[in-house]
Every structure is written in structure tokens, then in C-alpha cells.
Amino acid sequence: MSSLFRVMSCALLAGVLLVSASAEARFGKRSNSSEDTEEESDSRVHDATPVGRGSGSSGSGHDDSPVFYRSRPSRSYVTSRPSHSFWSESRFASRLHRNFTLGLDAQVMREGAGVGLHLGVEGERFGGFLRTSGLTLKADDGSGDSDNISVTELHLSFAALTGRMGRLRLEGGVSVAKAPDVTFVGPSVGLSSELYLLRSLSLEARVQLTPWPHRQLDAAGGMVWYLGAWNMFALRGGMRVLMLDDAGWVDGVPHRDVLPGPYVSFGLAI
């Protein structure tokens, strides 16, 4: 199990490096040479239905170590069996498995910066995740202005592999990308994993893909340090690559942005 988690986590981390850095123009924004007509600048919102439904429940283990009694005519003695170590108890998974996560994210990119929010609720197998980011990027027309882009992913998840070393999740749902001249809504699929190195240190990786109507690839990988009382706070850091391609829906010319950069995050992990 542990070797499989390591393979999957390393594969997801390697996905960060597979995106080329070519870009023709700003995602979801009309080219300067395109005709500016009101009829063609409709909102163009493309709807899609989220995939997958699920509900989850969380479980917790407890120590059922038996108690042995030995009696003598004059008095009795009560002796307890020594408790198991933390690493061998059945509650290992529940101690490391987080049922609720909430955090604020920040990212620095070549052309700007971004801030975001992530929220997760997860049981033993099923869960749900919300990830949203607002990006402020330098305008590509040389005007010195800035362009605002936001991306949101809403996923249901299923833990296909679980164990004492971590878990591997399959995700599916809907993604929303809002650009200066268009808003896209489309189906979204993803894969995420977490591999525990120590009791309070783990590796995490995720990748998300939207194939239509626009093209979106969101890949991130890094480390998580759990700290504080009961390890209820999480400090995250790593690399993220976001690729956005409007597939020519704005003015017939595909516009693509590739936005790599480091990220940090801090929040709750209960």
C-alpha cells in the first residue's frame, strides 16, 4: 500500500512540470485586432451538470485493551495490559484522517499574484471539496492595467485507496472560470493524494482537468506540516501550475495562459 501511495504521489507531483509555458494572449479576453461588437460580447456562459453524488460519514477508533484481574484471599490486584503504541493502534487512520479542512491560500506568479480559499469535508470514503482562487495579472496589451481572473472547482470525492500511510481520492464535479470577457462552466475531474511521512508531516498532490467548453489544468504538489494542539492547524507550501485556454470562444482565436508559481496556505485541519 505504501509503495503505491508513493508512486501515485510522485506522479501527481511530476504533473506540475508537464505544462509548457507558451501563451498567445490573455485567457478569456478579446484580442486588440478583433471586432468589438455588442452582439458577440454576450456573457457566453456554458452550463454543465456536476457529475457524481455522494455522502460520507466519519469513524473513530478506541482502545479496547482488556483488563486482567487477579485475586488473593486478603486483597485483590488490578493490572492493565500495556497500551499499544500510536503507530499500531486502529485509530491511526482516524487520527491522521482529516474530516474538515479550511484554509487561506496565496500564490506568486510570473505575471501577478493570487489569493484563494479551500474547504473540504470528508468521511471514511466520501467527501466534498471547494477550491477557489482570484488572480490579478498584468494586462497583456501594454496598458499597465491589470486583468482579473477567477477559477472555482466544486468536487465530490471518493477515497479509492485508504490506509495507515494516507489516501488516494478520485474527484468529479464542476469548474467555473471567469475572465474579462467570458464566463465558462464545465465538467471537471480530478485526482488527489496524501502520503504521511511522519505523524505531523505529509506530502500532498492534486491535479484537476476541465476538457470543455474551455480547457483548464490545475496541478499542485507540496508538503503539509500539522502543528498546534492535536495537530489541528495545517501549514502548506509547494508549487502550483494553472493552465487556462478559452479555445477561441471569445473571438475565434484561442487565448492561453500558463501560470506557474509557489504557493503557501494556512488553516484548520480537524
Image: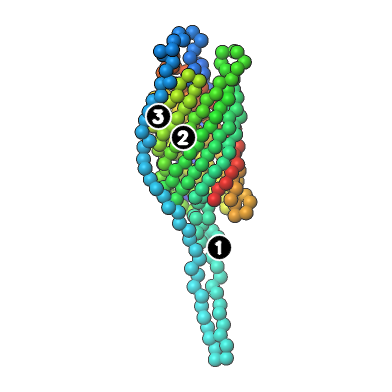
Residue name at image x 44 percent, y 43 percent: 128
* Up-down relation of residue 235 to residue 67 (above or below): above
* Up-down relation of residue 166 to residue 35 (above or below): below
Question: Which residue in the rendered view is the most extreme toward the right?
Answer: 228
Q: Residues within 10 Å of mark 3 (few under 14, many from 20)?
A: many
Label 2 sits on residue = 153
Q: Which element type, helix, strand or loop, lies under badge 1? A: loop
Q: Nearer the viewer, residue 39 or 175?
A: 39
Rounded to the nearest angstrom, the CA distance separating label 2 from label 1 is 39 Å
Label 3 sits on residue = 186
Label disc, if present, on residue 46 of the rendered structure: none
Give the quadrant of residue 49.
top left
Which tag, 2 or 3, sits closer to the chain's start? 2
Give the quadrant of residue 239.
top right
Front of the two marks 1 and 3: 3
Residue name at image x 47 percent, y 46 percent: 121
Check disc 1 and give the amino acid type: Ser
Check disc 2 and give the amino acid type: Glu
Q: Which element type, helix, strand or loop, lies under badge 3? A: strand
Q: Which element type, helix, strand or loop, lies under badge 2? A: strand
Label 1 sits on residue = 85
Residue name at image x 52 percent, y 81 percent: 69
Q: Residues within 10 Å of mark 1 (few under 14, many from 20)?
A: few
Q: Measuring from the top left, give residue 222's x and y in whole percent.
A: 56, 39
Which tag, 1 or 3, sits closer to the chain's start? 1
Q: Measuring from the top left, give residue 151's x and y in whole percent.
A: 49, 30
